[in-house]
Amino acid sequence: MQPLDALYLSPHLDDAALSCGGQIAEATRQGRRVLVVTLFAADEPEAPPSDLARALHAAFGLDHGIVAARRAEDEAAMRELGCDSERWTETEGIYRLDPQSGAPLYPTLEALFGSPVPADDPLVETLHRRLADLPPAARVVAPLGVGGHVDHAIVRRAAERQFGPATLCYYEDYPYVQRPLALWGVLRWRRGWRSAVEPFGAMALEAKLEAIASYDSQVKPLFGDHARLRRKVMMHRRRLGGERLWRRAATSRKERKQA
């Protein structure tokens, strides 16, 4: 397998573009090989398993073929960023069912943005094994888990099991990171972490904006409209100077060598 310059792990069909679209576009403009893998991209069940799933479908403005439409949006977004992409057929949290009772594992927003339930432990192991089959990458970037979505937490756990937390880079999950104190709650007020800002130019910014706009089903629930999308993303980039990544601070000789 041809090595990658960077591998980005995206829980859902928009997370990588929202959180890392600028740095991805900048890298591909410089001729680097970048792969984005979206882990939860399986078709939705024929009947929504919960009131939460039905409410989210309504917010997306789609009533059938929802994930297929979102995959098409993602393909358009990845073309804007100029990167390679894969979409795995794992089922996202709003559709997963308890294997014993058949009840939704995450029937409410409180559950979806809580802790992963024990029934999802085998899923972490499945993802861990699949990650081992990906091409080697000079840098692997996983979600930090800002906001607390269970799917983001599960991807982070699987990535840490496969690659080791000392070698991973972590992205700030946007737009959840805009919530007051959301970032610092995950980082435990920055203890044991260090950050670096990935800058990107005007052309990469425009590619990121166009990529995010490709997710038409997500623009209204996330931003309200396209004008607010552009304004909020541009303000976020201006405030940080780019997109911020985090790494574990090395605390031992072994960890310093790995980092």
Image (cartoon, rainbow, N blue to C red):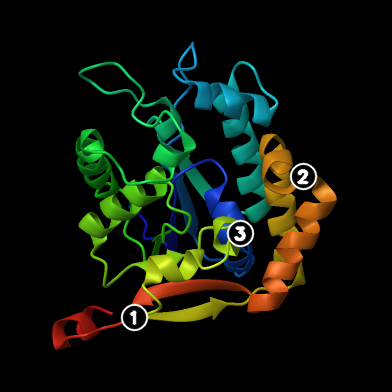
**Identity, as a three-letter code, of the amino acid under mark 2:** Gly
**Mark seen at residue 21:** 3
> Quarter-wise, where is residue 255 in the image?
bottom left
Q: Which secondary structure, mark 1?
A: loop
The single residue placed furthest to the top in the displayed view is 46
Q: Which secondary structure, mark 2?
A: loop
**Residue at image point 59% right, 18% down:** 65
15, 52: nearer the viewer: 52
Residue 162, percent from left and from top: 23, 56
* Residues under numbered marks 2 and 1 in contact, where contact means CB atoms less than 8 Å apart: no
> Quarter-wise, where is residue 125 in the image?
top left
Residue 258, percent from left and from top: 23, 78
**Where does the C terminus fall, quadrant-wise?**
bottom left
Q: Which residue is mark 2?
A: 224
Nearer the viewer's eye, disc 3 or disc 2?
A: 2
84, 113: nearer the viewer: 113
Label 3: how many Cα within 10 Å (few below 14, some 14–19, many 20+): many
Residue 131, percent from left and from top: 29, 48
**Residue at image point 57% right, 66% down:** 180
Q: Is residue 253 above or below residue 188?
A: below
Nearer the viewer's eye, disc 1 or disc 3?
A: 1
Q: CA distance from mark 2 to mark 1?
A: 35 Å
* Residues under numbered marks 3 and 2 in contact, where contact means CB atoms less than 8 Å apart: no
Q: CA distance from mark 1 to mark 3?
A: 27 Å
Label 2: how many Cα within 10 Å (few below 14, some 14–19, many 20+): few
Q: Which residue is mark 1?
A: 191
